[in-house]
Image (cartoon, rainbow, N blue to C red):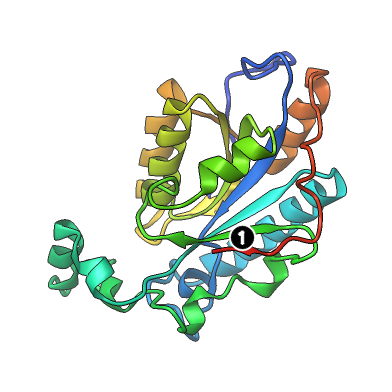
């Protein structure tokens, strides 16, 4: 888990936007990482409880503020969709790699694909469960979902900081979204040193980093916060 943290900003800011319309992008907060009884690629022991508690509080605060939450879930039809990545094939053959179980990870129908129940509200959250690579925009309709609801600032949470969070935050920045990585709501299965290395990459060039409380306080202080159009509602899964 992250240390409380972070942005160098001290005065009220608008994150480079005239009007701010935020959404949470919650990445892979599923049993495949966070339920030790079924996880194929678990976070370090004890970290799952911290991640779940922090995200449960942040999600509750965001729902109360009518901020949409988009849940991203990795799912593969079969192992061939995993093995097409050469580096992942290499990791699967390495007995010491933290990601050596990647060819068993989140195959369709496995319990690992289920979002942690405490973190999911089907009456509020949108679900995009076609994610297959670290970058959440590749092969999914995430960009369509965000733009169709007028979202221009992403509050990014989830697992893993040094792969999915890093890749998606960089891609979001390149697509001209403002990004805040919520430091107390992200973690890495590869350990705290890789988590912090990812944060060091993000801060100078791609994203703000703040705790959940800091981010919501900054949005309130900005004076430019607007609600998304039609995103807070009972919503179907977006397969």
Task: Give me the residue at 13% from left, 73% from top.
Answer: 93
Residue 151 seen in this snapshot: yes
Residue at position x 75%, y 65% in the image:
121
- Of residues 227 and 187, the one drawn nearer to the viewer in this rendering: 227
Compared with residue 57, is residue 79 higher up or lower down, i.e. above or below? below
Q: Is residue 97 above or below residue 78?
A: above
Direction from residue 91 to residue 27 in the image, left or right: right
Residue toward you, 108 or 54:
108
Which residue is at 53% across, 51% downward? 186
- Which quarter of the picture shows residue 132? bottom left
> Mark 1: which secondary structure?
strand
Image quadrant occupied by the C terminus:
bottom right
Q: Is residue 107 left or right of residue 116?
A: left
Left or right: 111 with respect to 153?
A: left
Residue, disc 1: 127
Residue 26: % across, % down = 59, 53
């Amino acid at each position: 888990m992250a240390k409380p943290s972070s942005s160098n900003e001290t005065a009220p800011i608008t994150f480079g936007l005239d009007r701010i319309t935020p959404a949470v992008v919650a990445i892979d907060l599923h049993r495949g990482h966070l339920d030790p009884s079924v996880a194929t690629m678990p976070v370090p022991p004890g970290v799952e409880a911290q991640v779940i508690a922090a995200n449960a509080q942040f999600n509750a605060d965001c729902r109360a503020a009518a901020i949409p939450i988009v849940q991203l879930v990795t799912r593969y039809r079969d192992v061939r969709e995993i093995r097409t990545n050469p580096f992942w094939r290499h990791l699967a053959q390495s007995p010491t790699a933290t990601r050596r179980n990647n060819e068993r990870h989140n195959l369709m129908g496995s319990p690992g694909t289920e979002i942690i129940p405490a973190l999911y509200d089907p009456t509020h959250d949108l679900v995009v469960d076609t994610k297959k690579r670290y970058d959440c925009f590749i092969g999914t309709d995430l960009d369509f979902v965000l733009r169709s609801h007028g979202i221009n600032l992403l509050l990014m949470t989830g697992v893993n900081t040094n792969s999915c969070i890093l890749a998606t935050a960089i891609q979001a920045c390149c697509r001209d979204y403002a990004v805040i990585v919520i430091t107390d709501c992200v973690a890495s299965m590869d350990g705290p040193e890789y988590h912090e290395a990812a944060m060091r990459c993000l801060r100078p060039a791609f994203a703000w980093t703040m705790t959940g409380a800091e981010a919501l306080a900054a949005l309130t202080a900005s004076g430019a916060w607007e609600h998304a159009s039609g995103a807070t509602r009972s919503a179907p899964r977006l397969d």
